[in-house]
Amino acid sequence: NAGVMQNPRHLVRRRGQEARLRCSPMKGHSHVYWYRQLPEEGLKFMVYLQKENIIDESGMPKERFSAEFPKEGPSILRIQQVVRGDSAAYFCASSPKFAAEGETQYFGPGTRLLVL
Amino acid sequence: KNEVEQSPQNLTAQEGEFITINCSYSVGISALHWLQQHPGGGIVSLFMLSSGKKKHGRLIATINIQEKHSSLHITASHPRDSAVYICAVSGSARQLTFGSGTQLTVLP
């Protein structure tokens, strides 16, 4: 059973370009979370999605950032018109069906975004 | 004040020592998670617990719900245990809220 896959692992963009980060959850997992780790800072929640639905985007910046998890294919985190402050490691995590006591989240290897 | 506080921020130990990392939280939770972030950046889930104690190999995690406190213990520490250990909590909202991490270095 392959783990959570993210690609690309490293992404370099110039200011003003678009960045697309992909996440394929573990097989059978229907919940996807995106987290961001800024340099020298801790992990912060961005968005929580289930297939075709955004459940909670309270951690997403209001502008330039969007996320989707289509019926078919990976989850996509899209950053438009990137700025230097977007440089960070972006982690995707997935979990299986809802469990009342909480679910273990399985993390992908992350995408390191560098904005020049 | 952060919702999840970890201590210490940095910890250096000699190989073989018993290590304890502490985590306190200020919100209601459904589960507490301990994660390990390797020097290369990858993140591994070590434990998810909502009560009591769990053990896996040389790692032990405990939680006291009344005191809103958890500890991660490493017995017979080894240089390969060197990593950042992160405490995180989840509640009715499924996403994780993270502590700032504890950088552990185990010297040979």
Image (cartoon, coloured by chain):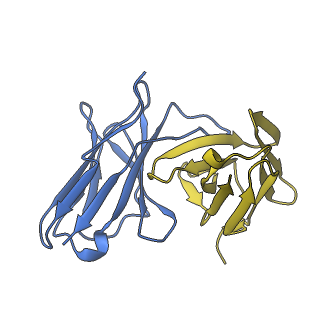
Chain colours: A blue, B yellow
User: Viewer-proximal residue, A44 or B36?
Assistant: B36
Residue B56 screen position, x and y as percent:
73, 33
User: Viewer-proximal residue, B51 or A36?
Assistant: A36
When the figure is inspected, residue B62 is found, relative to residue B4, above or below; the finding is above
**Furthest residue in direction top, as rendered:** A1
Residue A15 screen position, x and y as percent:
15, 73
When the figure is inspected, residue B75 is found, relative to residue B25, above or below; the finding is above
Residue A30 screen position, x and y as percent:
42, 33
User: Viewer-proximal residue, B32 or A42?
Assistant: A42
Residue B89 screen position, x and y as percent:
64, 54
User: Viewer-proximal residue, A19 or B103?
Assistant: B103
Quadrant of res A83:
bottom left
Please indicate whether residue B66 sits to the left or right of residue B101 in the image. right
Query: Which residue appears at 72% of the width and 68% of the height?
Result: B8
Quadrant of res A22:
top left
Please indicate whether residue B75 sits to the left or right of residue A59 in the image. right
Residue B34 in sight from this viewpoint: no
Please indicate whether residue A49 sits to the left or right of residue B100 in the image. left
- The quarter of the picture where the N terminus of chain B appears is bottom right
Residue B75 in sight from this viewpoint: yes
Query: Which residue appears at 22% of the width and 56% of the height?
Result: A11
**Furthest residue in direction front, as rendered:** B108
